Amino acid sequence: MARIIAVANQKGGVGKTTTCVNLAASLAATQRRVLLVDMDPQGNATTGCGINKMELENSACDVLLGDATAADTIVSAPEGGFAVLPGNEDLTLAEVNLLQEIGRELRLKKALAPVAGLYDFVLIDCPPSINMLTVNALTAADGVLIPMQCEYYALEGLSSLLKTIEQVRDSVNPGLDVFGILRTMYDPRINLSNEVSMQLIEHFDRKVFRTCVPRNVRLAEAPSFGKPALLHDRHSRGAIAYLALAGEILRREDARTKEAV
Ligand SMILES: Nc1ncnc2c1ncn2[C@@H]1O[C@H](COP(=O)(O)OP(=O)(O)OP(=O)(O)O)[C@@H](O)[C@H]1O
Ligand SMILES: [Mg+2]
């Protein structure tokens, strides 16, 4: 069964989408079967994979509203070797319409159930807010990957996200856990980054990924080519960092499976 990971942080611009697209490509490069689900009306993950978000036959909005199945909506990323359940600004409509529905937070979980077995990893890109779309992602997931920049206000934002995770765990998804915290756009020359980083490790210990993603221009420019950085410049520090993250995740998963036996 797939490991379903919501990539979430209500703070904007911390690297959620960059992490989704590049981690999907890196896991796919190690022959893992990956589905990337775009739950953000901005549709950045969709565009970043080289898919035109304005010309979707079906989208994540249709899936949430029950107008299309996941199987009928999933497409292949033109490059990168993984599958995408694309999204666009119609998701805003889905969010509003879901508010009147019973079982509204379970829509994504139910929609993914028939296809999840086809993948080793499902990564869900969340919008920068805690709304019904994010709650759907947290309800469908078994882990939350939290990208964060090591800045002063980051820790404050983190505690409110952790509260939401706890609420979802206590209500609809008892198995939900923090999958890991990823330091993004990391610059070790900045003292504050090191300080925040140390505090993170103090509080969250092994939940903090050892891999840090550096600030790297290739990661920022790759979406304009509709490609993960791995296919734009595989020798770039950004592409290498996400390959390292994939390796770290696979080793962790391996250890977890062995523990469970
Ligand atoms: N490691 C990095 N190095 C350089 N630029 C980066 C890096 N990670 C992300 N960026 C750039 O920073 C911006 C924000 O990143 P991204 O879109 O991944 O964040 P996000 O959390 O998904 O944003 P939003 O909250 O709007 O969805 C983008 O322009 C992206 O290309
Ligand atoms: Mg994003």
Image (cartoon, rainbow, N blue to C red):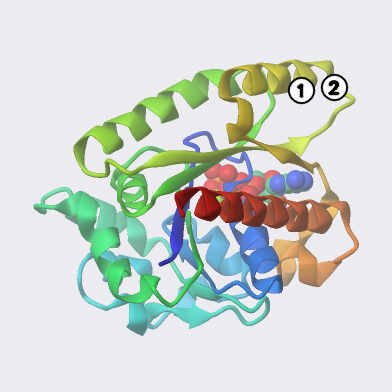
> Measured from the top left, where is residue 257 in percent x and y?
51, 55
> Measured from the top left, where is residue 52 in percent x and y?
54, 76
How far is mark 1 from mark 2, CA to CA?
A: 5 Å
Mark 1 and mark 2 in contact? Answer it, CB < 8 Å.
yes
Location of residue 35 with respect to 154 vertically, above or below: below
Query: Is 255 situated left or right of 57 in this image?
Result: right
Disc 1 within 8 angstroms of ligand 1 (CB): no
Identify the residue position indicated by label 1 in the image: 193
Location of residue 116 with respect to 185 vertically, above or below: below
Q: Nearest the camera: 200 or 61?
A: 200
Disc 2 within 8 angstroms of ligand 1 (CB): no
Any part of residue 17 in sight: no
Any part of residue 145 in sight: yes
Q: In the structure shown, which secondary structural element does the residue marked by tag 1 occupy?
A: helix
Identify the residue position indicated by label 2 in the image: 190
> Measured from the top left, where is residue 53 in percent x and y?
50, 72
Q: Residues within 10 Å of mark 2 (few under 14, many from 20)?
A: few
Three-letter amino acid code at disc 1? Ser
Where, quadrant-wise, is the N terminus in this rendering?
bottom left
State the image quarter where residue 51 is shown: bottom right
Q: Nearest the camera: 122 or 251?
A: 251
Residue visible at 46% across and 21% down in the picture: 159
Q: In the structure shown, which secondary structural element does the residue marked by tag 2 occupy?
A: loop
Three-letter amino acid code at disc 2? Ile
Residue visible at 62% across and 25% down in the picture: 205
Location of residue 169 with respect to 226 vertically, above or below: above
